[in-house]
Image (cartoon, rainbow, N blue to C red):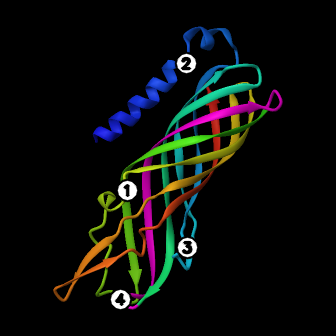
């Protein structure tokens, strides 16, 4: 929870560190809300197949205009990520591993205004895992290794690179963004089978890959 507080504080510092006179003098600086759908997946060399999970993303943004063509846009978002993964091993047979990872996310985007109404966006994002919902459906129901899995079995922090494009019309805006995760989100799992300890890294090399469609409103 301390990390969550620190991340929220960092977002506040970034937003309010923008000079007040810059915010008040430039009509292109604005605060607003945004929300939309997230289409998430994992990428990993070890996974045979995986299906996209549809979730939600929403929160606040602040666009601080540096010039008529360039702006910085920090955001504070609640984002649902995850995936459904098909795999096959000697313990479970064919199975599907389904999870939903809920993050508090801080993107800090550089915004290039190509025209008055169209822009391109790029920058890093940082995220903190709030909670996780994990399920496993396997041919061998006697071995349900995700029964007790939760957010403690995933890395708390994620970070990566975001790229996007947006359209802005007075108070209304919409656009798309792709986030490419650079930090693995899974951990090695340790299980006890017939008194023997077994370590599985089936999901240890997962990284987030998320496509977002959003609608925003400038306040």
- Quadrant that contains the N terminus: top left
Asked if residue 219 can be seen in this view, the reply is no
Q: Which residue is mark 2?
A: 18
Look at the picture and state if 158 lies above or below 23: below
Q: Are marks 4 and 3 in contact (CB under 8 Å)?
A: no
Q: Disc 1 or 4, which lies upstream in sequence?
A: 4
Q: Which residue is mark 1?
A: 155
Residue at image coords 19%, 89%: 194
Secondary structure, mark 2, is: loop
The span from disc 1 to disc 4 (Cα, nearest Å) is 25 Å
Q: Are marks 2 and 3 in contact (CB under 8 Å)?
A: no
Secondary structure, mark 3, is: loop
- Find the magenta span and give its range: 90-117
Q: Are marks 2 and 1 in contact (CB under 8 Å)?
A: no
Look at the picture and state if 155 lies above or below 4: below
Decide if residue 144 is on the left or right side of residue 165.
left
The span from disc 2 to disc 1 (Cα, nearest Å) is 31 Å
Q: Disc 4 or 3, which lies upstream in sequence?
A: 3
Mark 4 vs mark 3: in front: 3
Q: Which residue is mark 4?
A: 91
The span from disc 2 to disc 4 (Cα, nearest Å) is 55 Å
Binning the other alpha carbons within 10 Å of mark 1 as few (below 14), some (14 to 19) or many (20 upward) gives: some
> Residue most toward the right?
115
Decide if residue 152 is on the left or right side of residue 192.
right
Q: Which mark is residue 124?
A: none
Secondary structure, mark 1, is: loop
The span from disc 4 to disc 3 (Cα, nearest Å) is 20 Å
Residue at image coords 39%, 91%: 90
Q: Which residue is mark 3?
A: 45
Please provide percent x and percent y for residue 159: 49, 48
């Amino acid at each position: 929870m301390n990390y969550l507080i620190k991340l929220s504080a960092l977002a506040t510092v970034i937003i309010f560190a923008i000079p007040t006179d810059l915010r008040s003098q430039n009509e292109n600086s604005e605060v607003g809300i945004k929300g939309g759908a997230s289409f998430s997946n994992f990428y990993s060399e070890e996974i045979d197949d995986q299906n996209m999970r549809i979730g939600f993303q929403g929160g606040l943004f602040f666009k601080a205009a540096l010039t008529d063509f360039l702006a910085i846009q920090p955001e504070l978002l609640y984002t649902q990520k995850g995936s459904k993964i098909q795999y096959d091993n000697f313990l479970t047979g064919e199975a599907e591993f389904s999870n939903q990872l809920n993050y508090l996310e801080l993107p800090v985007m550089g915004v290039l205004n190509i025209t008055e109404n169209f822009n391109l966006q790029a920058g890093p994002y940082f995220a903190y895992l709030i909670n996780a919902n994990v399920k496993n459906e396997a041919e061998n129901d006697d071995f349900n290794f995700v029964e007790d899995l939760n957010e403690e079995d995933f890395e708390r922090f994620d970070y990566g690179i975001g790229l996007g494009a947006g359209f802005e019309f007075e108070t209304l805006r919409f656009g798309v963004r792709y986030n490419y995760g650079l930090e693995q989100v899974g951990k090695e799992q340790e299980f006890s089978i017939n008194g023997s300890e077994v370590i599985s890294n089936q999901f240890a090399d997962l990284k987030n890959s998320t496509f977002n469609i959003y609608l925003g409103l400038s306040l």
